[in-house]
Amino acid sequence: MHEEKRLAWALTGSGHYLRECLDIIDRLENVDLFLSKAAAEILQQYGYKHNVGRVYQDKTASSVPVELFYEGKYHTLVIAPATSNTVAKMVAGISDNLVTNLYAQAGKTRVASIVFACDTEPELESEAPRDNIVKVYPRRIDLENMEKLKTFEETTVAGDMQQLDAAIQSRLACLRTSSS
């Protein structure tokens, strides 16, 4: 029996739009969650729960779960929310943790990636722990890195939650069309 390909969703250490990303995840089927070390901490700190099939955490030096991309288990990688640190590493080609390794291996196996970077505008309001809202002013380098990431092959960069949701729905619709 042929196992249906799944969507891989990676969370980084950002609380910015984390609740909204988890809401999208909860509406999707066939999702596996990949947590950076910081994401595992942030989920606890914010008190958020997730409802997915499999959860992989960044607990190995070689990011063992990336082998699932070589086995053809995934049709899409979503990294959302992505911290400025994660985006900078992806732009520089650094793959030294689970999430950046996932992005590198998705690219090498021609699996489409959808990234929602936290730092999308010069001024943002962000949810902090305990429902506090704070003003955030991304640095120029953060905004430049997001623009550079838009030029990478097999990568869609979403600028807000609506674009993220639309990119995921478009990808899923495209996959349904190609499989029928």
Image (spheres, rainbow, N blue to C red):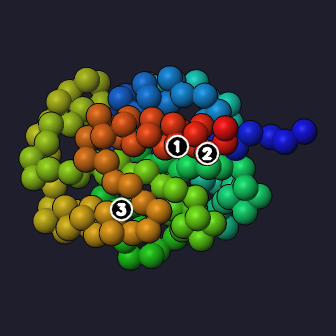
Q: Amino acid at mark 3?
A: Val
Position of the C terminus by quadrant: top right
**41 to 156, vertically: above or below:** above
| Residue 162's disc number | none
- Given contact means CB atoms under 8 Å apart, are the residues at marks 3 and 1 in contact? no
Q: Mark 2 or mark 3, which is nearer the start of the sequence?
A: 3
Q: Residue at x 52, y 43 (%)?
A: 174
Q: Residue at x 20, y 67 (%)?
A: 144
Q: Amino acid at mark 2?
A: Ser
Q: Is residue 56 visible?
A: no
Helix, strand, or loop for circle 3?
A: helix
In the visual, does 129 lie left or right of 126?
right
In the visual, does 98 lie left or right of 66?
left
Of residues 43 and 21, the one drawn nearer to the viewer in this rendering: 21
In the visual, does 30 lie left or right of 162?
right
**91 to 154, vertically: above or below:** below
Q: Position of residue 9 (x, y in %)?
A: 53, 43
Of residues 112 and 20, the one drawn nearer to the viewer in this rendering: 112
Q: Residue at x 74, y 39 (%)?
A: 4
- The residue tagged 3 is 87
Q: Position of residue 47 (x, y in %)?
A: 44, 25
- The residue tagged 2 is 178
Helix, strand, or loop for circle 1?
A: helix
- The residue tagged 1 is 174
Q: Amino acid at mark 1?
A: Cys
Q: Nearer the viewer, mark 3 or mark 2?
A: 2
**57 to 144, vertically: above or below:** above
Characterize the local packing of mark 2: few (<14), some (14-19) or many (20 or more) Cα atoms within 10 angstroms: few
C-alpha span from label 2 to label 1: 6 Å
